[in-house]
Image: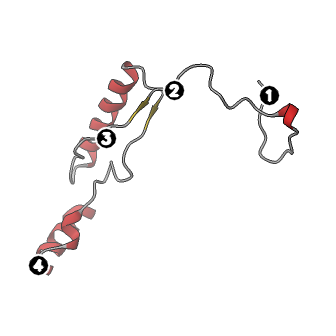
C-alpha cells in the first residue's frame, strides 16, 4: 500500500487503496449521559470503550454531546429555574 499525502498529485496508477482488507466494526452507543457529573461521565465513557473494544469494535462513535450531555433544561421553564440549573451545569 502506498502512503498518502494530501499535497501530492496522484495519477490513477498511483491511487491509494481505500478498500479495507477486513471489515470495520463500528460501535454506536445510544446511552443516557451522566448529567452534571463529569467524573461519572468519564468513567462511563471508559467502560463503554472497553466493552466495545472487547466486542471487536474498531471505531466507537459517541453522540456529539456525550460528555457534557445536552442540557435541555436550559431552554425552558421559568427564568429562576433556568438560572439555577445553568449555574449548576457550568460549575
Image location of residue 15, percent across then percent down: 80, 34
Image location of residue 72, percent across then percent down: 22, 64
* Quadrant (top left/top right/bottom left/bottom right) for the C terminus: bottom left
Residue at disc 3, secondary structure: helix
Q: CA distance from mark 4 to mark 2?
A: 47 Å
Q: How many marks?
A: 4
Residue at disc 4, secondary structure: loop
Question: Badge 3 is on which residue?
Answer: 42
Picture layout, residue 90 above or below residue 36: below
Question: Badge 4 is on which residue?
Answer: 78
Q: Residue at x 18, y 75 (%)?
A: 83
Picture layout, residue 80 above or below residue 16: below
Give left or right: position of 82 versus 59.
Answer: left
Earlier sequence position, callout 1 versus callout 4: 1
Which residue lies most toward the front here? 12
Q: CA distance from mark 2 to mark 3?
A: 25 Å
Question: Badge 2 is on which residue?
Answer: 24
Amino acid at each position: 500500500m502506498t502512503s498518502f499525502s494530501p499535497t501530492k498529485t496522484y495519477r490513477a496508477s498511483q491511487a491509494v487503496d481505500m478498500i479495507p482488507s477486513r471489515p470495520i466494526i463500528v460501535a454506536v452507543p445510544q446511552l443516557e449521559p451522566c448529567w452534571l457529573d463529569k467524573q461519572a461521565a468519564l468513567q462511563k465513557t471508559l467502560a463503554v470503550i472497553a466493552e466495545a473494544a472487547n466486542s471487536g469494535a474498531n471505531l466507537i462513535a459517541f453522540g456529539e454531546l456525550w460528555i457534557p450531555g445536552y442540557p435541555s433544561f436550559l431552554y425552558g421553564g421559568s427564568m429562576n429555574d433556568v438560572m439555577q440549573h445553568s449555574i449548576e451545569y457550568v460549575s
